Image (cartoon, helix red, strand yellow):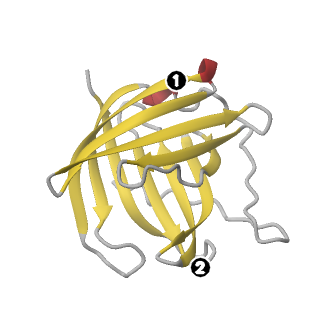
Amino acid sequence: MENQSLEIPKVIFDENGELLITASESSSKDDFDFFQGKSVIRNRKLKSRLTNCDEWIEFPSTQEMYKILNGIGNIDNFLATFDGEPFEGMTVRLFNPITKLWSIYWSDSNTGTLDKPVVGSFESKVGHFFSKDVFDEKPVIQVFRWDARDEKNPVWSQAMSDDKGKTWEWNWYMYMSKSS
């Protein structure tokens, strides 16, 4: 059920080594409407990233998303407990009506800073969002995938590549269901 059968789009770089990301024809400000409201989440997170680890940690969380900026953005709050300590994350998603690309920013109660955004769009109810980043002092490409083919039970997942997108390691899955 990990949705790994879906292909990650090929990563393309410009002459300066920057990611080239183009929106799908169907990309729209309404792409995340399926996620509005409250969700209960079963998380499955790799214990250690990019170390050939195969041990997973599972934990519950909740999330609530609402639209902002007359519908071209949304915010959600992610609440969980790690090692007995409360944890809060926040996502800000902004849709650029000119480029038709979404930028997704993350922050949490451990850092208090906004991460560099992942950028992308949806096609056929599956969204892929990419960024260049650094993890454990190594350059990586990360991808967020939103699989909303089942809108009542969407799946968010994250993968990293330390070889410029040739291979990917999935490191986190969120299996969501709508709560009342």
| Left or right of 122 in this view: 106 | left
Find residue 76 and report its image quarter. top left
Between the C-alphas of marks 1 and 2, the distance is: 36 Å
Name the N-terminal-most of marks 1 and 2.
1
| Left or right of 103 in this view: 67 | left
Other-residue count near label 1 (Cα within 10 Å), few / some / many at <14 / 14–19 / ≥20: many
Residue, disc 2: 163
Residue, disc 1: 67
| Left or right of 106 in this view: 14 | right
| Residue lying at 75% horizontally and 31% vertically, measured from the top left | 97
| Left or right of 68 in this view: 53 | left
Residue at the extreme right of the image, as rendered: 15
| Residue lying at 28% horizontally and 69% vertically, measured from the top left | 47
In the image, residue 143 lies at what x, y percent?
54, 58
The local secondary structure at tag 1 comes to strand
Say if mark 1 contacts mark 2, CB within 8 Å: no
Other-residue count near label 2 (Cα within 10 Å), few / some / many at <14 / 14–19 / ≥20: few
The local secondary structure at tag 2 comes to loop
In the image, residue 25 lies at what x, y percent?
74, 38
Find residue 38 and report its image quarter. top left
In the image, residue 180 lies at what x, y percent?
25, 20
Q: Looking at the image, is 97 positioned above or below residue 147?
A: above
